[in-house]
Amino acid sequence: MASTQYESYPPELNAVEEQYLLENVKDWSIAHGLAVRPAPSFVEPSQDPTGVLAITAPVTLFPSLFPRRCFEEGLAIQKAYNELYSAIARDEEWLKEIVEELIDIDDFVGKLWQTHLAVKKEGYVQDLSLGLFRSDYMVHTDPSNTSATVGLKQVEFNTIASSFGGLSSQVSNLHKHLLTIDAYPSSTASVIKADALRQSKSASSLAKGLAVAHKAYGISRTSRPLCVLFVVQDPERNVFDQRHLEYALLEDSGVRSFRLPFQQTLAHTKLDSDRTLVYTPPHSPSTSYEVTTIYFRAGYSPDDYPNAEDWDSRLHLEKSRAIKCPSLLTHLAGCKKVQQVLATPHSPHLKRFLPDEEVASRVLATFAPIYPLDQSQAGKEAQKLAQNLDSASRYVLKPQREGGGNNIYRKAIPPFLEKLPETHWPAYILMEMIEPPPLKNAILRNGDLQRGGVIGELGVYGVCLWKDGGDILENFEAGYLLRTKGDQSEEGGVAAGFGAVDSCCLV
Ligand code: ADP
Ligand code: MG
Ligand code: MG
């Protein structure tokens, strides 16, 4: 990516060009639901008492440069990643060994596992599981020459509440629209070539995943209409991202769905004697629905469980006959510890789940070095690296958490560990920082334009439906997400306030 046309991308805009571009970004975004609810720090709740306001989602003005080879590889191996994680979720014994190392030092993981055991005791009544996954990557460069691409390296694999599939389709449409209306200066033509912009079909593909599960559930056992239940956080600023899936599910497949705040689970759902899940919408209590599929967009963070009753809610949903997206075991398979164990050099684990050697080696090539912080030989060496300021600056320390804002970066690691009792260190994994190529872009967030160096993170969605103790019934790649953040920020979460949604300009 060294040629000059790439170095001067994106181009400087004069005031008139910039105004035209911004006007179109703002209007197109709202007109197409590329939007979020405003943060309370941006619009005070008292100024919007009825909750009618929405603002443009943080987006990049230009599609960011992304190496074509890396992009194609990420999409090509998604089916293998779906196979890998669905195999892990079906291997309770293997997962148990990993989880048992965490139970005593990570309450949240312990609670998830106990909930699984509690359902198992009564017997699972649904053997189908749905995964709407997202595998996240950065392009890794040679640290001594950041214009030399080494390849795609995985940041993490998400098995629960993989977000932004709805907005991602929209942002790739936005960038294409801006190109079509000549909002980008003509100088960009040498970079944004005819086949450079890749549309993300994530919204419709993820909705198709939900539709596939809905259909596989079969006919109603209670003579009620069938529905999919989105179990959500409340309030949820990223609601339109989820609405895009809901609308696509209805429009493409005719499947009805409802949004249910996780905290209201016990108030509005009940289990029939055969554990069919029945949902009664509070706005229309005369009609109850039989739930085919529970799509969790909540429940992945300890913050979702402030009261003991919230664990009762999770247990209640997990006991039901509805297909879970994800099941408890699939949720647990997304632990960062699983990723670390898979990445152990020369381990037999990958082969166990991906018997095809060629497939396994392509997946292996995307692993970055990750170490445990336990009493194993590798763990002890990693502990030394993590305690030293110089060596720690090449690493990130991660707990078993989702949703952003939980990691400890580089020089902050040694003082953090100093305060943490050593018995709790194994609850974390130590990962080498991926060093992506330096890029430039402009991010529009809350009406402010931030220009400068950025870092991109590619997410590839995958849909997988399988039978526990049986085979995979459906497996497909489901579009992509590009998130871009300022290069001064270690975290990348869009919802957490660090990043923007973007699309790929392949080079
Ligand atoms: P979460 O599940 O909370 O999203 P991640 O593992 O994705 O946790 O880490 C959050 C963010 O931290 C990522 O989006 C990325 O920006 C940054 N990050 C995580 N791991 C690495 C890494 N190995 N190299 C560079 N950046 C990383
Ligand atoms: Mg995650
Ligand atoms: Mg992440």
Image: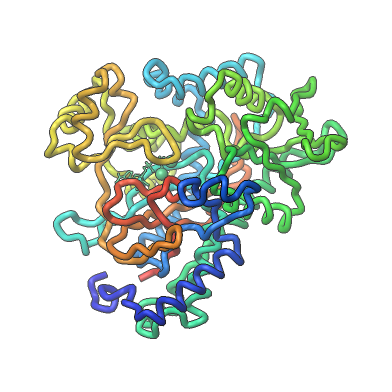
Asked where in the image residue 188 lies, by quadrant, the reply is bottom left
Q: In the displayed orientation, state which residue is furthest to the front.
A: 46
Q: Position of residue 457 (x, y in %)?
A: 37, 54
The image quadrant in which ligand 1 is located:
top left
Q: Residue at x 44, y 62 (%)?
A: 447
Q: Residue at x 55, y 45 (%)?
A: 45
Q: Position of residue 94 (x, y in %)?
A: 44, 25
Q: Does residue 466 appear anywhere in the picture?
A: no
Q: Position of residue 218 (x, y in %)?
A: 77, 39
Q: Position of residue 212 (x, y in %)?
A: 68, 47
Q: Is residue 241 left or right of residue 252?
A: left
Q: Is residue 334 left or right of residue 231?
A: left
- Please tell me which residue lies in front, 417 or 431: 417
- Please tell me which residue lies in front, 410 or 327: 410
Q: Residue at x 59, y 56 (%)?
A: 203
From what the image shows, is residue 155 above or below residue 282?
below
